[in-house]
Amino acid sequence: MSEHFDILVVGAGPAGIAAAVSAAAAGKRVGLADDNPAPGGQIWRSGTFQPAAARRWLARLNAAPLVRLQGWRIFDSPQRGTLRAERNSDCRDLCYEQLILATGARERFLPFPGWTLPNVMGAGGLDAMVRGGLPIAGKRVVVAGTGPLLLAVAAHLARRGAKVVAVCEQAPLRRIVPLTAALLGEPAKLLQGIAYGVAARGARFFTGCWPIAVNGREKLESVTLQRNRKHWDVGCDYLACGFHLVPNLELPALLGCRIENGFVVADDLQRTSVADVFCAGEPTGIGGVELALLEGQVAGLAAAGRTAEAEKLARRRKRQGFVHALRTASVLDPQLGKLASDTTIVCRCEDVPFAALREHANWRDAKLHTRCGMGPCQGRICGTAAEFLFGWSAASVQSSIRPPVFPALVSSLGASAKETCQSDGLPSAGASTGSQKEIL
Amino acid sequence: MSDRWDVVVVGAGIVGAACALECASRGLRTAIVEGRGIGGGATAAGMGHIVVMDDSPAQMALTHYSQTLWQELSDRLPRDVEYEPCGTLWVASDEEEMQEVHRKSALYATAGIATAILDSQMLADAEPHLRKPLAGALLVPSDAVLYPPCAAGYLLREALRLGARLYAPRTVLSAQAGKARLDDGSELQAARIVHACGADAAELLPGLPIRKRKGHLVITDRYPGFVRHQLVELGYLKSAHSLTADSVAFNVQPRRTGQVLIGSSRQYNTEGPAVDAQILSSMIERAQWYLPEIGALSAIRAWTGFRAATPDKLPLIGPWPEDDSLFLATGHEGLGITTSLGTARILVDHLLGEQTKIPIEPYLPSRFARSEAHA
Amino acid sequence: MPDPVRSLALRVNGVPLTVAPGTTVAAAIMMAGAPARRSVSGEPRGPLCGMGICFECRATVDGTPHQRSCQILCAEGMDVRTS
Ligand SMILES: Cc1cc2nc3c(=O)[nH]c(=O)nc-3n(C[C@H](O)[C@H](O)[C@H](O)COP(=O)(O)OP(=O)(O)OC[C@H]3O[C@@H](n4cnc5c(N)ncnc54)[C@H](O)[C@@H]3O)c2cc1C
Ligand code: FES
């Protein structure tokens, strides 16, 4: 089955919502595909607050004349102008004239002894679980790692009744507050207030502090924290630990969009190196909600042919000095790359320990010989970690990109693209079945 | 700067690694040069089916010989090689294909290979997820499955343990007259150079009758027991025995991990490694015809690789007539994982002037040099 | 007594459990106190990312294995199995 759109937007976070709403307002037939149960992306979904901007844009989205493809996960592009999506066991081809990629970012995880135990989660991860119904009232939580999410998550969990025992930020707080403000589109003052609010409920803030081990048998019982040269144990029920964000580049890479320094290259109008493919938000550089909204609008207008308006917005962006502030600002302490012991699992899908990876020269060799990254997460967790641990470049992580970019049913992967999207009747590759002598 | 060796092997795919190990274990001073990763070429793409094939007597001799060498080695293979003697089921969908089952069975018997003929019910019991009814199958219990990159890694480590030396990552820019020139400007001198460059063979030795033949594979998440044997169709019999057209066939493998590996396709004249949606879809369609429930499994990866195909579908093993120092070990098409061990054994036997266990003549590269001279 | 409109009944490893609508299967598994899965070497594992990326929360839902439980909402009568 297939559906045709003038403009297809992938990702219903701030950038994608802004793009879809803008393009639909310009009178185009717009589809908005997103793999989560609800729109909002990671930021608005997992954020503490319902910022005014979120409420405003979600309302616009609800009012916009566009096709919402919520819960659909894009995993392939079987031919030019077509993306293939799956939801449960349904499979659909989404055909487009113009495509806007707003695939957002995910948390970065780094391995340390015990990080695989149940109840050790990402910061955004625990937050999402709580929003998904996990009871948190009265539970002792340590929030750790680095980046803008930590404070927001700590505040949210505290408000839900969690006992936030400690918030451990690897970087200095004065650097994190402005970043958090940018990411969530909230004034720094407000956040500072929130931070004090969390503190007032009994949490301790540590900077230059991180977990070096998690202790427990079947699940987390306590976490060992380190600050300067001192370490100590903290009993807790959950550790919410993430190390900033990494962009989701799999789909742009599959489509052949140029990627430099770990981000999709886009021009002032959010055009990528591939004709008719635009990119907005985190994949072009992690710059926070306001920038994502702006980029989304620019992409939506530009894709809809409203070039003058798009250019005007793009100029505003320059004038206001929006930058991808978070690209370089939050550098991971190199010590974080040394926490894993020989036996610490790095690849959680295939249980590949740190020592097995260290012997290899690059990601591909490690993958082939240890099975690292060969599991269903396709290296999204371990590849990102290996990049930091071993300096294996992002390019090598992305160079092996092939469909399916997410696991999909064999039948979805194999569904024929023949009868879809074919206004111009592309010639088929002409595979004949079983017409051969050799088998292997 | 120059180092002297008895043998320099170019390429550390499974064939090169096997050759290096054979040389080292026979006391030859051996170097092996690899431009990319160990087992990173066709070896990384292969299915790892260790299989006896009977397209021609020569193919059967080499695959059978090699298979017994794998069996001898199997006790020593480390866990990561995932050697699993699961056997092959050649699946017959109708009576015509059952006749092929009987023919194959008789032929294998003459070679001393035990087989069993399964009727429709026995096949259904052996592989409950196959469609019903099918006519039956030929079971070849001595066939096996392994994970090729780690097999190549193991062979190479053994060679290094016996004193061979690895140059990697180093590309050989030219190899002739006993000299191999590397991309760092150094040169290796050797009495013999073994050319084991797989599908890239013609880059180093233009004029070799080798073409790249692309293949696609898909692997699923873990479903232990979904299939129990390597399953291969006999359905190709009814269609043209085409050597040129793009084609797909039902060929499904159980991995030790419980994953299901789905093959396979064959295409000429496509250089790029990109996954081709049309081919993938025909291949999966074919697999779904035989295994109706396979569509409901989760596919986690798809990839492609290039086989080194020769015009007569037999590998090139032995001296290259135009250069006394040069030996070839390439052109293994879709059977190089299987035939790596046999290739290495007869190559080194021949190189040392010893008697080979099976006749080497059908594989000698001179068969092409001759025909070209006459053309 | 559970309000039939405000709660859903499902089973996790055969044990009955009542949750609020909108609860993810991953959260239900955690409430039941079970690890979502055993890793390939037998370690207990639970959700990590909460957003469908890490595949640590895989469980068998209504007979279908390898389902990311954090992306699925609980439904009345659902049968969830962890390994
Ligand atoms: C889809 C598919 C399925 C298959 N299934 C099976 C199967 O089930 N069973 C089976 O037996 N076979 C199978 N095969 C075939 C098998 O994979 C190959 O025959 C085998 O891997 C060939 O090994 P090789 O060492 O000759 O080549 P390769 O593995 O390609 O090794 C050649 C090596 O040489 C290196 N090299 C090349 N040029 C240079 C240079 N100038 N300098 C330095 N290094 C160089 C390359 O980097 C490479 O590592 C399959 C192949 C494919 C594509
Ligand atoms: S918790 Fe990561 S996929 Fe569900």
Image: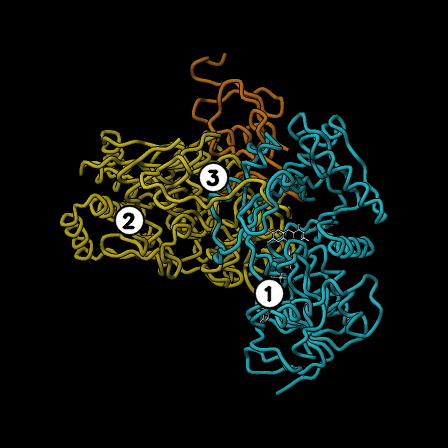
Chain colours: A yellow, B cyan, C orange
Which residue, given by chain and number where applicable, does mark 1 sit on?
A: B209
Looking at this rendering, what residue extends furthest in the bottom direction?
B1
How far apart in space, not on screen, are marks 2 and 3 (Cα)?
Answer: 28 Å
Is residue B37 shown above or below A26?
below
Where's residue A348, x and y in %? 58, 47
Q: Label 3 sits on what residue type?
A: Gly
Count how many numbered circles sit on residues in the image: 3
Picture quadrant where residue A27 is located: top left
Circle number at residue B135: none
Q: Where does ligand 1 appear, by image quarter?
A: bottom right
Q: Nearer the viewer, residue A328 or B35?
A: B35
Foreground mark, 3 or 1, reads 1
For mark 1, give the secondary structure.
loop
Which element is circle 3 on? loop
Residue on which disc 2 sits: A276
Query: Is residue A214 in view?
Result: no
